[in-house]
Each structure stands twice: as structure tokens, then as C-alpha cells.
Image (cartoon, rainbow, N blue to C red):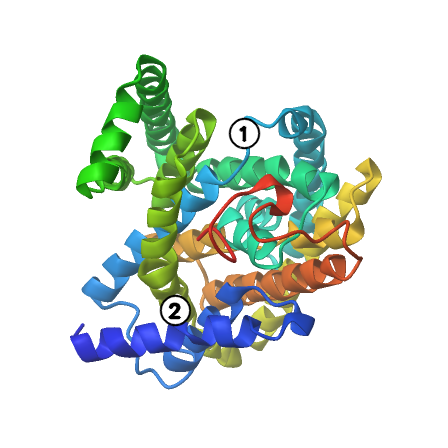
Amino acid sequence: MTFATLAVVVVAGIAGPLLALPRRWHLPVMLGELAAGLALGSTGTGYLDAADPTFSFLGQIGFALVMFVAGSHVPVRSRELRSALRPSVLRVAVTAALAVLVALALNVLFHTGHVGIYAVLMASSSAALILPTVQSLGLSGDAVLASLPQVALADAACIVALPLVIDPRHAVRAGLGSVAVLTVAGLVFLLLRQAEHSGWRRRLHRVSEDRRFALELRFSLAVLFGLAALAAALKVSVLLAGFSLGLAVAAVGSPRRLTRQLFAITEGLFGPVFFVWLGASLDVRGLGHNSHFVVVGILLGLGAALAHLSGRLFGQPAALALLTSAQLGVPVAAVTIGTQLRVLADGEASAMLLGALITIAVSVGGAAVYSRRGPDSVGTSQDSAGLTSPGGRPP
């Protein structure tokens, strides 16, 4: 990767704000970035090579940062959020059960033998997409806040479950790796809480602000990348590392200065690079050679939307239920792992990605519909759904 290529990637990322600029369209910023990646990557012109080691690594940094910032903006200390935890668990459980039924039906129709993989895909919710969408559209209110634990729980559970269903031979290793990452994130939370109670964090903040050292940002990035390194060594997605660390920071309380700094480096560079890289890595042209997998992809996307609509049974607005159906990290991880292990049929990886793209379209549509409900459903970018950030979306 060269500076010229990086410049193209950054310019391509500007498609996100440009597409989201007309407020009447109600589109999240990341949608334009994904579209630019699709146009310049393997699906489009092929100018951007998502397999380039440098580009891929920058994308992984962006992924970790996007999830870190997304996790840090979840109001875990909110009493309303904690009270929504139990119904969120029920919604996730019912969604997963319906996803299994749809996966069984797909297996009967197409004999793929991948009931577990398809069920995990359809049950997942992408915090990397949904939380930025909530933030960029300024969605607010109790119903939105009550949906956040569902997204976090489904995302984390499916991230942990995916290696178990796609590579059962190494299920124990994958499970232990996830436990190790979550344990380290828990230890970081305890250290941060102790630093807050002892006053050490405030002293560090004063020195950093007075001398312009950005020490809090440096320490945060060091811990993030260290946890991501642990996740990579244990064959666990950096998504889990970033999101769990973000939750740990949110539980203690992130200083506004650190929030602004993280927002700047994520939104200004690494977030757009990640979404452009992700779009460039999606190859939906492969479906042209396996037409029956086009149907599989469409049914995966619609099946995910149907499974998540079960939230209506618990009083969740249909538009928000559709919003929670977006998939991102789990399908990409499934395609990556499945391709490496050669457990997917020709065209099946493209079908999974097509299903993910359909869920993104459904999710964006649900968010747009909900945002038009009036002032009770839309707040400012600072207070939407209880999330706080200096701009239009956390990542």
C-alpha cells in the first residue's frame, strides 16, 4: 500500500458524510463508506486490494477502534439500561431460537449442512453498525436505550459462538480464548476503577491537559492494542477485544477529553479506512457463477430480519427490531474462517455476504423509519440514546 492508495481510501471515505449530509435521507455515515469500498474493491473496479497486508492491518486497527469507541459509548452505568437487561436476554434468546428454525429450513431446501453457521449469522447483531447508526441519526428515547443491551449481548454471544460452530474441532480453544480476552478486560476495569477511586486518574488528566501530553489517549491505545494482540494470538476476533475494553471504560466513566481524542482519530481516519476496507473485501460478483446461492443469500438476509422481528412480542417497535438485525463482523469472520478451513462450498461465502448486505439495508431502513416518528425518537448527537460524543456518531 502506498501513500497514493491511502489518499484514495481517505477520499473515498468522504462519501460517507456526503451521502449522510441530506437530513431528509436519514442515512448513517458508514453506509457511504461501505458503498465506496464496494465500488473500488473486488465487487467494483478492483483498484483497492483488501488482501494487501498494510491495508488489511489498517482496517483491523479501525475495526478495533470502532468497537472500542462503540463500547465506550454504551451507557452501562445507566439505571434504565440495567433494567432493560432482562428483556434483552429474552429477545436475544427468542431471536436465536427463530434463527435456528430458519437455518434448519434452509438446510432442508439446499442441503448445505451448515445449520449452526447460518443460525449464528441470523441471530447476530452488529454493534459496529448499529451503534454508529443510532448516533449518526440522533435516535433517542427509552425504546432505543432498551435495544442497546440486546445488540451488545447478541454481538458478543455470536462472536463467541461462531468459532464453535464453524470449527468444532477447535471449539475448546476458541472458547478459552474468548474467556481469556474477557477476563483481561475485566482486570482492566478493576484497575481503572481503582485508579479513579484513588485519584490517580485525575492527577494524570491534569498533567496531560496542562502539558499537552495526551497521556490518557496513549495509555488507552496501548491497552487496546495489547488486548487486540492477545485476541489475535488466541484466534479471537479483535471485535471482542475492542468492545469489551470499551465497556470497561464506559463502566468507569470516560473523560470528555479522551472521548474527543478517540472520536478524532477514529472518525477522522481509522473508522473510514475500516469501512472502506470492509466494502473492498466484499465480493458479491461470485454469486453470478452460483445462482442458487443468490437465493440462499437473500433468504439469510430476510431470515435475519424475520428472527429479529420477534422483538415485537416484547413490545419493541418493529422499526427498532429491524435496526437490530444488521450483520457485519460475524459474517466477515465466518467467511474468513470458513474459507481458510475450506468448509464452505463455492459461492457460499458470497451468499453470506449478500445476506449481510441485505440486513444492512433492512437495518438502515428501520432506523430511517424510526427517526421520522418525531422529536421523541430523535435527539441531538450528544444525547441520542444516552450516548455522548462530540459528533455525529461514536466511531
- Label 2 vs 1, first from the N-terminus: 1
- Count neighbours of disc 2 (C-alpha within 10 A) and say few if under 14, some if 14 to 19, many if 20 or more: many
Q: Position of residue 173 (x, y in %)?
A: 33, 31
Could you say which disc has been placed on residue 303 in the image? none
The residue sitting at 63% across, 30% down in the picture is 81
* Most foreground residue, 247 or 78: 78
In the orientation shown, which residue stands out farthest toward the front?
A: 210
Q: Which residue is mark 1?
A: 76
The answer for how far apart the CA atoms under marks 2 and 1 are is 30 Å
Seen in the picture, residue 223 relative to 11 is either above or below; the reply is: above
Q: Which residue is mark 2?
A: 276
Indicate left or right for 15 with 238 as reference. right
The residue sitting at 36% across, 52% down in the picture is 63
Indicate left or right for 5 with 180 as reference. left
The residue sitting at 41% across, 52% down in the picture is 333
Q: Tell me the quarter of the image containing the N terminus.
A: bottom left
Q: Position of residue 39 (x, y in %)?
A: 43, 81
Q: Position of residue 239 (x, y in %)?
A: 39, 44
* Most foreground residue, 58 or 137: 137
Of badges 2 and 1, nearer the viewer stands 1
Can you see residue 222? Answer: no
- Count neighbours of disc 1 (C-alpha within 10 A) and say few if under 14, some if 14 to 19, many if 20 or more: many
SS for callout 2:
helix
In the orientation shown, which residue stands out farthest toward the bottom?
A: 45
Looking at the rendered structure, the kind of residue marked 2 is Val
Indicate left or right for 272 with 365 as reference. left
* Most foreground residue, 243 or 155: 243
Seen in the picture, residue 221 relative to 56 is either above or below; the reply is: above
* Most foreground residue, 369 or 342: 369
Looking at the rendered structure, the kind of residue marked 1 is Val
Q: Position of residue 147 (x, y in %)?
A: 67, 40
Seen in the picture, residue 292 relative to 89 is either above or below; the reply is: below
